[in-house]
Image (cartoon, rainbow, N blue to C red):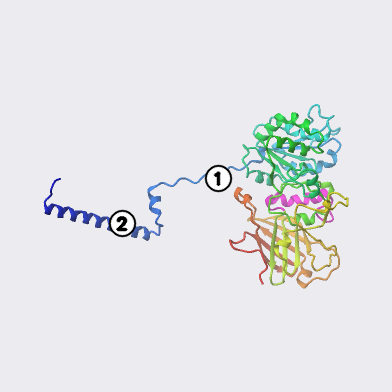
């Protein structure tokens, strides 16, 4: 083992100590420099490594990628055509809506979608014929279709909302999307896990093609089932595919006045309404089709906001205001807790008129609707009168619906008009996946007119009366 002179060892030790001191001073200087820049300690790593670019935003789903297949018959088409024109005319330039009939009508139909009469179907039972629509729609061989959407001739689609809903899902995977009935009895009779066809349902293109290949062999096993939707559901079950529920599809298995149902719509975007002939006009003093045309004035401005419920409180006058955007506003005297207002008032009747207890059970929360218009627990209702575009958003204006000569508190007694301002509801995919109810602020322009501004709630803001 070599032996070094003492002076050499001492020199080497001093050099080592100097290097350690220099390294320590350099580290302190670097830390002080980073602190001066107000950078976190981890910033030194980001200086050395180039950050990866953010992922590109998901591509929006064009409406042209949806193919609508509407089931109808030569006997029902004439009376249902106005409903079909209402939602289909604005998208008619896309040529992606097809009307499937048992036979051609004996009158011209220039304002309706392309009529398709599949061969050898006129003698089939309606349930079987309509169930084959999946195969018939795929057989059209329209290029570029991502989603096949199915509905009846009395199904009212909200097409822009439908696009937003389907944009949450990967169209290259197998999806069967829709919703069950509002009626417990109807679900119990047919299935709780089935998309009811009148409310409409969507099938992704690869699943539709797979179903079309096996449909005829499958349908033969289900001739005993009542409806086409039950047969499609059964064949999809055989393919191993279950229903993805989207509560915005509405079968509307209820009758009469839909006010309580639509004034407390869930946060989900509305995709459809069905059984239009079984419900009363949505607005007073209008025909059924006129009231729907009136509703679509608001739909054309901001479809994503239609029927969205917003609740706010006027502390000064002790009022609670519940807005169903584009439809109605209810003003309650006193403070009403939000959860109570989220339940639907039973202004409607069960679908079946029998005395079966199950017929009066619904798949959503309900509360009593007092038939006495002068009851102090009942709200004063204002219906949408007109819609006005604004540079930054939209104004919807509501006028009072007078029902009886009732005594009310001073603030409500004088209130004749309500104007609501809202920004356009430009949802992205993530907001649709995780919706949050919005807040609103109340002011008065005069004794008889209330102004409401709808806005996003603060991070920790509660929708509640503050007292």
Read off the magenta span.
Answer: 281-306
Q: Is residue 335 above or below residue 183?
A: below
* Residue in the foreground of this view, choosing between 276 and 90: 276
Foreground mark, 1 or 2, reads 2
State the separation of the CA atoms marked 1 and 2: 41 Å
Q: Is residue 225 above or below residue 287?
A: above
Query: According to the image, label 1 marks what residue?
Result: 57
User: Principal SS element in the magenta part?
Assistant: helix
Say whether disc 1 or disc 2 marks the residue closer to the N-terminus.
2
> Could you say which quadrant of the image residue 124 lies in?
top right
Query: According to the image, label 2 marks what residue?
Result: 27
Task: Specify the quadrant that holds the C terminus.
Answer: bottom right
Would you say residue 365 is visible in this rendering? yes
Classify mark 2: helix, strand or loop: helix
Instruction: Please tell me the numbered disc located at residue 126.
Output: none
Residue 375 as seen in the image, left or right of residue 431: right
Which residue appears farthest toward the front when viewing the image?
A: 1
């Amino acid at each position: 083992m070599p032996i070094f002179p003492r002076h050499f060892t001492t020199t080497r030790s001093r050099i080592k100590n100097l290097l350690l001191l220099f390294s320590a001073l350099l580290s302190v200087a670097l830390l002080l420099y980073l602190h001066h820049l107000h950078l976190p300690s981890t910033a030194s790593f980001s200086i050395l490594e180039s950050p990866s670019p953010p992922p590109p935003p998901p591509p929006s789903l064009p409406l042209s990628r949806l193919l609508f297949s509407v089931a109808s018959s030569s006997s029902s088409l004439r009376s249902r055509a106005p409903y079909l024109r209402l939602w289909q005319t604005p998208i008619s330039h896309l040529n992606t809506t097809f009307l499937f009939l048992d036979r051609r009508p004996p009158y011209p139909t220039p304002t309706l979608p392309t009529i398709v009469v599949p061969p050898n179907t006129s003698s089939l039972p309606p349930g079987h014929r309509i169930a084959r629509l999946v195969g018939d729609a795929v057989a059209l061989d329209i290029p570029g279709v991502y989603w096949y959407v199915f509905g009846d001739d009395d199904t009212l689609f909200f097409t822009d909302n439908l696009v937003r809903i389907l944009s949450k899902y990967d169209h290259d995977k197998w999806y069967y999307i829709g919703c069950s009935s509002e009626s417990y009895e109807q679900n119990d009779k047919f299935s709780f896990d089935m998309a009811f066809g009148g409310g409409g349902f969507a099938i992704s293109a690869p699943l539709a093609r797979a179903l079309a290949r096996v449909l005829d062999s499958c349908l033969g096993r289900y001739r005993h089932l009542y409806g086409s939707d039950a047969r499609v559901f059964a064949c999809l079950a055989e393919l191993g595919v279950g229903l993805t529920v989207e509560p915005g599809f509405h079968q509307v298995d209820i009758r009469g006045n839909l006010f309580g149902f639509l004034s407390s719509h869930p946060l989900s975007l509305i995709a459809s309404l069905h059984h239009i002939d079984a419900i009363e006009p949505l607005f007073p003093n209008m025909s059924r089709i006129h009231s729907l045309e009136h509703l679509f004035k608001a739909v054309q401005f901001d479809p994503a906001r239609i029927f969205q419920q917003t609740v706010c409180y006027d502390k000064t006058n002790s009022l609670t205001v519940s807005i169903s955007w584009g439809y109605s506003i209810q003003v309650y005297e006193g403070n009403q807790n939000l959860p109570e207002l989220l339940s639907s008032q039973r202004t409607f009747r069960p679908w079946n008129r029998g005395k079966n207890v199950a017929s009066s059970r619904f798949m959503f929360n309900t509360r009593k609707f007092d038939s006495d218009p002068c009851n102090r627990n009942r709200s004063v209702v204002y219906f949408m009168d007109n819609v006005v575009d604004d540079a930054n958003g939209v104004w919807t204006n509501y006028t009072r619906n007078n029902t009886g000569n009732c005594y009310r508190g001073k603030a409500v007694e004088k209130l004749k008009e309500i104007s609501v301002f809202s920004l356009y509801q430009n949802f992205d995919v993530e907001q649709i996946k995780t919706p949050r109810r919005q807040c609103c602020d109340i002011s008065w322009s005069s004794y008889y007119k209330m102004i409401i501004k709808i806005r996003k709630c603060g991070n920790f803001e509660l929708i509640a009366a503050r007292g």
